[in-house]
Amino acid sequence: MAAPQARWSALLEMLTRDGRIEVEAAAAELAVSAATIRRDLDELARQNMVTRTHGGATINAIAYDLPLRYKSARRAAEKERIARTAAALVKPGAVVGLNGGTTTTAVARALAERGDLAEEAGEPTLTVVTNALNIAGELAVRRHVKLVVTGGVARPASYELIGPLAADLLAQITLDQVFLGVDALDVAHGATARHEGEAGVNRELARRAERVVVVADASKLGKRAFARICPVEDVHVLVTDGDAPAGLTEPFVAAGVEVVRA
């Protein structure tokens, strides 16, 4: 693994997997010298991607804004279960919205793999509207999916299109369901995101949907982020992992949200 960029990606993936790394263990896993790993970690720290510690590094306070591919390892098993459960809520012929994020990307893949959504007489049996470029790329080759992509300006960290061009398109359509990935969800503040531009487009997706489904693992519950997407009253269903503590889910049930455990 000679290229520095390849090592940096590998180190970030290890950090998302384990939360912290030690120089000697990382050197052994990547088959390079400890001195190389120290230089790599120093460079990642200079870029504010990690926090250096004695003998290693941890993900720092801005880890939420790492590129999407670096987040995919976090709670991956829970996200896969949530995605399959959420995708099962979709009926053939539905018009579905998906925002960006690791969990909604997994939902898109689960929808693409559903055998009962196969083509009928060559016509698409599912319409997906998304502002996420990576989701669009995965679904564009699926013949049973009619894909609609919003306009907007792309955010490199999340692959999401944001801004007035996205809002203009969404104002012209309606959705049966929208699956929202969020940075945080609690009863008092509702569904929230860390970036105001993403929150704005996600808010429009929610407004255009007959049914709002939040897909969020337990680590997102009972927390809040900077920008509101929608109040909890606008959330119809929460799909979360099966081992989410009752103390985190019961407030949503009390608020009238249907909680589905995956």
Image (tube, rainbow, N blue to C red):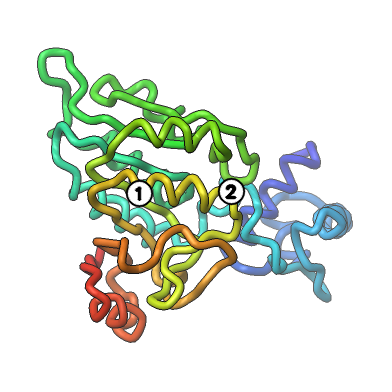
Compared to residue 164, the image places residue 23 above or below, namely: below
Residue 198, position as x, y percentages in the image: 54, 49
Specify which label sits upstream in the sequence, 1 or 2: 2
How many marks overall? Answer: 2
State the residue in front, 98 or 167.
167
Task: Report crowding for label 2: few under 14, some 14 to 19, many 20 or more residues within 10 A (C-alpha).
Answer: some
Residue drawn at 50 percent across, 62 percent down: 228
Residue 221, position as x, y percentages in the image: 42, 73
Task: Report crowding for label 1: few under 14, some 14 to 19, many 20 or more residues within 10 A (C-alpha).
Answer: some
Location of residue 195 (image quadrant): bottom right
Type of the residue with mark 2 = Gly
Q: Which mark is residue 197?
A: 2
Circles 1, 2 touching at the beta carbon (< 8 Å) = no
Q: Which residue is mark 1?
A: 207
Location of residue 71 (image quadrant): bottom right
State the residue in front, 160 or 200.
200
Type of the residue with mark 1 = Arg
Compared to residue 39, the image places residue 51 above or below, namely: below
